[in-house]
Image: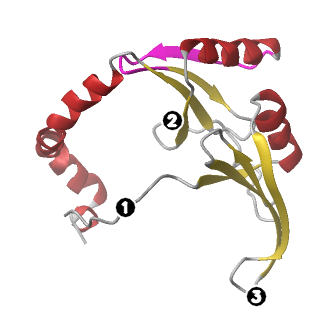
Amino acid sequence: MNTNIPINNIHHVAFRCRDAEQTRWFYEDVLGLKLAAAMAFDHLSGTDKRIEYMHIFFEMVDGNYIAFFDDPYNAPSDFFVDMNGFDSHVAVEVESMEHLKAIESKLNSINWDSFIIDHEFVTSLYIFDPNGIQLEFTCRALDHNKIMAEDASKAHQEIKDWTERTRSLKEEKFGEKSLAKK
């Protein structure tokens, strides 16, 4: 189904953070993103529910944001552990391998763990931020667009084949109704 509604870009993605200042230090001082906003609230936006929290935004070069909620009154104490990248991660793009290596060097200077994987269409540097969120810094391969076009040409068939191989397992695990198209 093609809705023909133009979705331009991601304005922001938002996550919980353990501490606004620690998160500011990491994203502004270490990674170099601009602190674009820090808003303290005493009620849940759009409601009368009393809740104190802070919402902070960091701006990327393209004008999009990564944002965080500092909500110490309601955050579970065991929430901030390294998340599995399959469950949630943020991939941001850098212009060149030199920029990727510069990030790696900056992280090494503060003894922050990182690792690099060549995925063929991109090379990625992976880290966990102070909140347990996996960040992926990607640099496009020279033939990125060609690889993506080739993959796009067979994407529907790949999903169909995958669904045929895994549907019964998913129905058993999640229930047939949970997989229905709404």
> Of label 1 and label 2, which has the lower sequence position?
1
Give the structural element (helix, strand or loop) at label 1: loop
Q: Could you tell me residue 169's position as x and y percent?
A: 21, 47
Residue that label 3 marks: 48
Give the structural element (helix, strand or loop) at label 3: loop
Q: Sort mark 2 into few (<14), some (14-19) or many (20+) by Cα contacts within 10 Å.
A: some
Residue displayed at 19% across by 64% down: 1
Q: Where is the C terminus found, in terms of image quarters?
A: bottom left
Instruction: Determine which of the numbered discs, if any, sits on residue 6 in the image.
Output: 1
Residue displayed at 13% across by 40% down: 165
Q: Nearer the viewer, mark 1 or mark 2?
A: 1
Of 37 and 56, which appears nearest the observer? 37
Q: Could you tell me residue 102's position as x and y percent?
A: 69, 14
On the image, which quarter does residue 178 sit in? Answer: bottom left
Compared to 155, does 113 lie above or below? above
Q: Could you tell me residue 63's position as x and y percent?
A: 63, 47
Of 63 and 92, which appears nearest the observer? 63
Using the numbered discs, state the Cα–Cα distance from disc 3 to disc 1 in whole angstroms. Answer: 34 Å
Q: Nearer the viewer, mark 3 or mark 2?
A: 3
Residue that label 2 marks: 85
Give the structural element (helix, strand or loop) at label 2: loop
Range of magenta residues? 111-123
Q: How many numbered tags mark residues here?
A: 3
Q: Amino acid at mark 3?
A: Asp
Q: Amino acid at mark 2?
A: Gly
Is 119 magenta? The answer is yes
Q: Nearer the viewer, mark 3 or mark 1?
A: 1
Using the numbered discs, state the Cα–Cα distance from disc 1 to disc 2 in whole angstroms. Answer: 28 Å
Q: Could you tell me residue 147's position as x and y percent?
A: 27, 24
Q: Amino acid at mark 1?
A: Pro
Of 51 and 68, which appears nearest the observer? 68
